Amino acid sequence: MASNILVYVEQRGGNIYPATFQLMHVAAELASKTGGQVEACVIGSGIAGLADKIAACGAKKVYLADDAEFESYRVMPYASALSAAIDAASPKTVLMPTTALGRDLASRVGARKRAALVIDCTEVDADGEDLIATTPMYCGKVSSKFRLTGDRLQMVTIRSNVYPAAEPADGATAETVSVAAALRAEDTRLSLKEIVSTTSGVKDVTEADIVVSGGRALKSEENFKIICDLAEVLDGAVGASRAACDAGYQPHTRQVGLTGKVVTPAMYIACGIDGAIQHLAGMRGSKVIVAVNTKAEAPIFKLANYGCVIDLFVLVPLLTQEFKKLLER
């Protein structure tokens, strides 16, 4: 087994998911310690043009599974394609993003390849032939380290935004290798009839550098407009607590927390959120946390870098105005 690192490139409609570039950074760090090279695998339809973007971030070889069957994600065809790419590349390590797709695909392929697999890592490091993977447990109260030995394929999914993105280099090129996945009848027995987007082009909380979240204190869907206005000015995403989503103020696709989406943005602004343990577990990895709440004893203040004990309906519109002035300069 070679010491190479294979990065799974998650793409949606021909657009590379931002976490991929963070994985390329991790792969480069590991390769510098193991002496291997960084390679990548892209699965989709009409995705040959993505190879140059991946090459610019350090991939020396790109495996392309380009077929009409891969136009939209289905776990069985994608699992066969990624398994075929692993067979062709014979990597030591496979890196994937911790997304809904990444979790689904990694588990399936890991079982097929009898790999050592750790999901949702916040840190990975090489120790000789072994891979040391760190992942949070018990709502983020503890971190566990796993040693993936070098005698079998190592697979990990890495949480978004815990590593910086790789810097692209001008003029970088990569060898491209076509991967022909032998799809079985059972791989394609389920056909996709329609895809309905629920995001309307709005940033997802897992992708944004800034997330502005609101809680039940917003009291209505209409009042969430002040959260949306602040997020728009900051080019961020709108999040919500489980209580706010359960009350119908926001869709569950925006729910932040252990039972929703785990986020690690550069800044997390929590407005009217007391800080239930499930919510804190979903955002405690944020680099800077700002809490706005009228309850000085709210648990979220123990985690916040900056706390504002004030009515959110007073402060949030003021923040929106001031940020708008600053950004217009």
Image: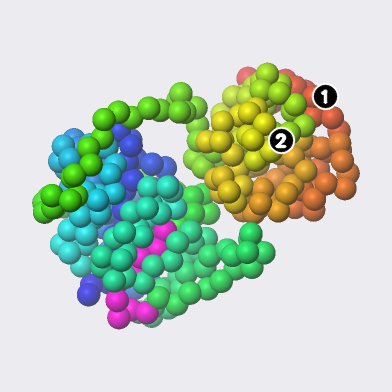
Question: Relative to the observer, which residue lies in front, 171 or 188?
Answer: 188
**Residue 171 numbered tag:** none
| Residue highlighted by disc 2 | 215
Q: Is residue 243 magenta?
A: no
**Where is residue 315, by image quadrant?**
top right
Question: Relative to the observer, which residue lies in front, 324 or 44?
Answer: 44
Q: CA distance from mark 1 to mark 2?
A: 15 Å
Q: Residue at x 56, y 71 (%)?
A: 144
| Residue highlighted by disc 1 | 314
Please tell me whether residue 124 is drawn above or below residue 161 in the rendered image.
below
- The image position of residue 263, as x and y in percent, is 57, 46
Question: Can you say which quadrant of the picture contains the N terminus?
Answer: bottom left
Dot 2, crowdedness within 10 Å: few (<14), some or many (≥20)? many
Q: Which residues are magenta?
A: 149-157
Q: Is residue 153 magenta?
A: yes
> How has the structure been colored for display?
rainbow
Kindly check if marks 1 and 2 are in contact, taking CB atoms under 8 A apart as contact: no
Question: Relative to the observer, which residue lies in front, 221 or 8?
Answer: 221
- The image position of residue 96, as x and y in percent, is 37, 55
Classify mark 2: helix, strand or loop.
loop
Q: Residue at x 61, y 47 (%)?
A: 257
**Where is residue 112, by image quadrant?**
bottom left
**Where is residue 189, by image quadrant?**
top left
Q: Residue at x 31, y 59 (%)?
A: 108
Give the label, 1 or 2, closer to the camera: 2
- The image position of residue 141, as x and y in percent, is 67, 64
Left or right: residue 45 versus residue 5 is left
Question: Relative to the observer, which residue lies in front, 323 or 40?
Answer: 40
Report the residue that reaches farthest toward the right. Answer: 296
